[in-house]
Image (cartoon, helix red, strand yellow):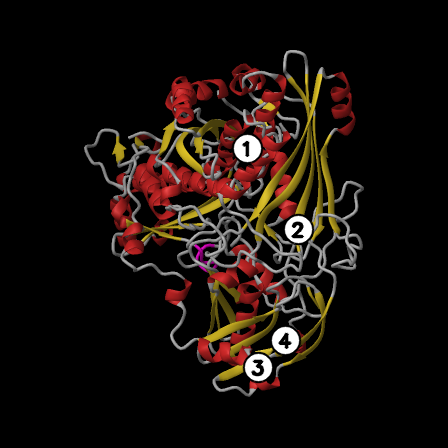
Amino acid sequence: MEKFGKSQPVRRFEDTRFITGAGGYVDDVAPAGSLYLYVVRSQVAHGTLSALSLDEARAAEGVVMVAGSAELHAAGLTGGLGATVLKNRDGSSAAAPKHPILAEDRVRWVGQPVAMIVAESLEAARDAAELVEMEIDDLPVQLALAPGEVALHDEAPDNRGLDWSMGDAEAVEAAMQAAAHVLTFSVHDNRVIVNAMEPRGCFAEWEAGRMHVSFGGQGVWGAKAELAELFALDREAVRVTHPDVGGGFGMKAKLYPEYVMAAFAAKELGRPVRWIADRTESMLADNGARDLDHVVRMGFDADHKLLAYHVKTLCNLGAYNSNFGQAIQSVLFAKVLTGTYDVQPALLEVEGFYTNTAPTDAYRGAGRPEAIYLLERCMDLAARKLGTDGWELRRRNFIKPDQFPYRSATGELYDVGDFATLLDRAAEESGLAGFAGRRAASEAAGRLRGLGLCYYIESILGDPSETAKVEFNEDGTVTIYVGTQSNGQGHETVYAQFLSDQTGIPVDLISVVQGDSDRIAKGGGTGGSRSVTTQNNATLATVGAMVTSFTDYLAARMGVEAGDISFDDESFRIKGSNAAPTLLDLAEMAREDGRTDLLTHEQTATLPGRSYPNGAHVAEVEIDPGTGAVTLERYTVVDDFGNLINPMLAEGQVHGGVAQGAGQALMENCVYDAEGQLLTATFMDYAMPRADNIPMISFTSNPVPSTANALGMKGCGEAGTVGSMAATSNAVMDALWDKGVRQADMPFTPQRVWAMLEDAAAAL
């Protein structure tokens, strides 16, 4: 048996319960008899909360609690939600205004929680909400990423919450001065709504002074610490769990006000309290994503070698900071700023502005899609302005295999890579040689055809450490406890499969436990494509410790030296003996001998370095110039994910990511009117990709194993999205270029594409 997994395309074990309706999501597992929480939200984007009358709602039938911020404060709940705060370029801390659980003095976005109602039924709570009276004195609405008429927060008088940079400004400017070609581009990355399949939800309960909060999230330990601080509890008095989770995308990584409200109400009322968002509520109250404006300068020498890369970015912070938001995005953006190209130096400048939009920003893709989208759009445009082929321009600027390990301009140490080989494979798999014929056929039918390339790289981010615990149970089964959290990626399958590969324990005897702060002491959660690489690294360490312990036990029991015993990933072999006990055999022996210490094994392991998934995406689109309708006709992916544990799950991750990125490129768009009202607050108004919008996706694995972990893995969770936004956009740009279109930003809806063509024709 191979040491690092068989790399077999095992079907997902968890799908049986999901597709038969037996999943255990928040709404399925909330305690019977729970009270219902309903949140009364602001209907205006910005204003002073001058009056709030709750008495009539309190008297309504079925209502057991109504509270505003005053009631929370009276009970001692005076804190706000956490935030990650960077240092500004001048060394000062970026703004960090309090993010209250319920609005205190002002409302700052449509949908901000103002009051909470708890009732015996959801219907009763909704009816009571109609009786809440609030008076809000309007203030000017701030939507632009610029200083405004009125500051949203005293801490940011010009609404600039962040002014951060990374890189060498002097070296960049010197390189630009020496460049034969300096090109400047403006690129917009449109705002999208995350729209996880399962809306956010939670329940909370208290027993003997101990809090339990369960919600659909991406890791329990951050929420545990934050709840303990808000309620002034010892951390051991807080339990956080995640049941099955139907999609995360970064949006579900943080603590939200509703979870705190449910915990507060459960404590005060002595009964469990549940809350589930409806879709419009989610669209209003979930963290938003993207919404960046970039100005890019690229300096090339006479041979089209990229000399310097300079990015100025304005980003939408939303109404408040987040502990998983734009501050983190800025850092993640910098990690892959220069992509796969040999470019020194580079400079990233980020200004973040508060606006009256969503509660805060999120990272549906964690900064990598933004960075690669920007770089690959600009590389494509640069090739057109330089009069060279975009594929050749990329090859010319790739980091070469003999340059690894390579330290990027932003400090990342790329360990391995063979980008040109993957690009050649992408040309073959995508049928690049036949594109001219396909374009001619489209033109003969009165349509435009374009081909777009994106070569991406990302990095495994987040906590490099993870913990795994393996228990041998009395009934002969085995449980592995993990510190990551599945949001639908298939973790139960891949973790059981990997443990089985390493130990020979039949996979049907292995169960996976995740998302429970009581059952595993620590973990890094899920995000940044970290889960499988970090978790299996910890599992490998745990297996190593387990084998060592059982080897010593078996040696003592058999009266032989430990060095005479070996383990072949299935059974122990003893020199001079035909005996071949398995781990399950030895666990049963240990139980009979009273050696309960051998029945549980736990290890925390830390990756020595990051790994860098990379690959090429090739999109092919056809456009009807009469209507502007864009059809994604062909899509090809060649990825280097290093060694794969389960190729089927990796391909599924890529398919989902491609749909997400192409969805943003072609149709998704979050729109607010001038008063800060969300115009795309239902699926009647917000377009999501469907099966008939996405073609069959060709996926090829071309691994170059990482040297930064013993498994040779690189991660893959976000790779599909990282590559697809730019590939799809570049394909549309390719189709429009010969018609005179020179500025084209997502989303490429029929109306927008038709208008681009009309404007270009009028300018000729």
Q: Residue lying at the far top in this picture: please name it.
A: 303
First in residue order: circle 2 vs circle 4? 4
State how far apart marks 2 and 1 are (Cα): 30 Å
Tell me which label, 2 or 1, sits earlier in the chain.
2
Kindly identify which residue carries mark 3. Answer: 131
Q: Is residue 532 visible?
A: no
Q: How many marks?
A: 4
Q: Check disc 1 and report the residue beneath it.
A: 609
Specify whether 166 is left or right of 707.
right
- Closer to the chain start, of discs 3 and 1, is 3
- Please name which of the two marks, 3 or 1, marks the residue nearer to the observer: 3
Kindly report the distance in space between the C-alpha atoms of the residues bearing marks 2 and 4. Answer: 25 Å
Q: Residue at x 64, y 61 (%)?
A: 109
**From which residue to which does the magenta span run?**
515-520
Contact between labelled residues 1 and 3, with CB atoms less than 8 Å apart: no
Numbered tag placed on residue 357 in the rendering: none
Choose mark 3 or mark 4, whichever is in front: 3
Q: CA distance from mark 3 to mark 4?
A: 14 Å
Per the picture, the main secondary structure of the magenta-coloured stretch is loop
Q: Nearer the viewer, residue 346 or 465?
A: 346
Q: Secondary structure at mark 3?
A: loop
Task: Mark 4 or mark 1: name the one nearer the start of the chain.
Answer: 4
Determine the CA span between mark 2 and mark 3. Answer: 33 Å
In the foreground, 479 or 414: 414
- The amino acid on which the numbered mark 4 sits, given as a three-letter code, is Gly
The residue wearing badge 4 is 68
Q: Quadrant of residue 574?
A: top left
Q: Is residue 186 magenta?
A: no
